Image: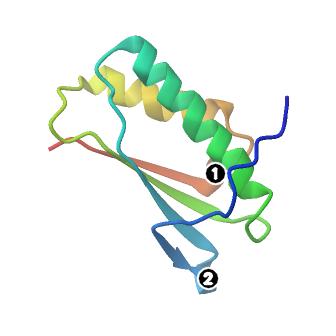
Amino acid sequence: MESLDWGRVTPEAAYPDRNEFIYVYNHDLTSTEKVDRTIRFILGRLNYYDNHLPKDSNHLIKIDARGQELSDSTCDHIQQEIKRNYLRPKSLTIDIINK
């Protein structure tokens, strides 16, 4: 896979003493295609972060879906696919904010 250069990594918050970094995504999740694109995007970003942050960083992902009607199964799908396809799923926490 070609390496992407997204520039500087800028988490919304960082807790260096715990090696934790928080990211917030606000994407349109109103179709299957848009959900799948968001999953691919977040996985790409996670892989990029791992090359630019301290070793074994913990990632706290917040997906802001307020104002969108997402089913529980869509939320579960997003979380499961990201964790299934990320190399270090135990270092990952995903919260979907939809209320």
Label 1 amino acid? Lys
Q: What secondary structure is marked by label 2?
A: helix
Q: How is the image coloured?
A: rainbow
Q: What secondary structure is marked by label 1?
A: helix
Please state the horizontal and vertical placement of residue 31, each as a whole percent of the image. Answer: 33, 14
Which residue, given by chain and number where applicable, does mark 1 sit on? 90
In this picture, residue 11 sits left or right of residue 97? right
Please state the horizontal and vertical placement of residue 49, each as a whole percent of the image. Answer: 69, 56
Which residue is farthest top?
32
Residue at image location 67% in from the left, 31% down from the top: 85
Query: How many residues crowd around disc 1 within 10 Å: few (fewer than 14), some, or many (20 or more)?
Result: few
Q: Marks 2 and 1, Cα distance to the nearest angstrom?
A: 18 Å
Which residue, given by chain and number where applicable, does mark 2 sit on? 16
Q: Quadrant of the C terminus?
A: top left
Relative depth, front residue between 59 and 89: 59
Examine the image and state in which quarter residue 53 appears: bottom right
Q: Nearer the viewer, mark 2 or mark 1?
A: 2
Residue at image location 62% in from the left, 63% down from the top: 58
Examine the image and state in which quarter residue 28 appears: top left
Label 2 amino acid? Pro
Please state the horizontal and vertical placement of residue 21, each as a whole percent of the image. Answer: 55, 67
Relative depth, front residue between 11 and 96: 11
Q: Which mark is residue 65?
A: none
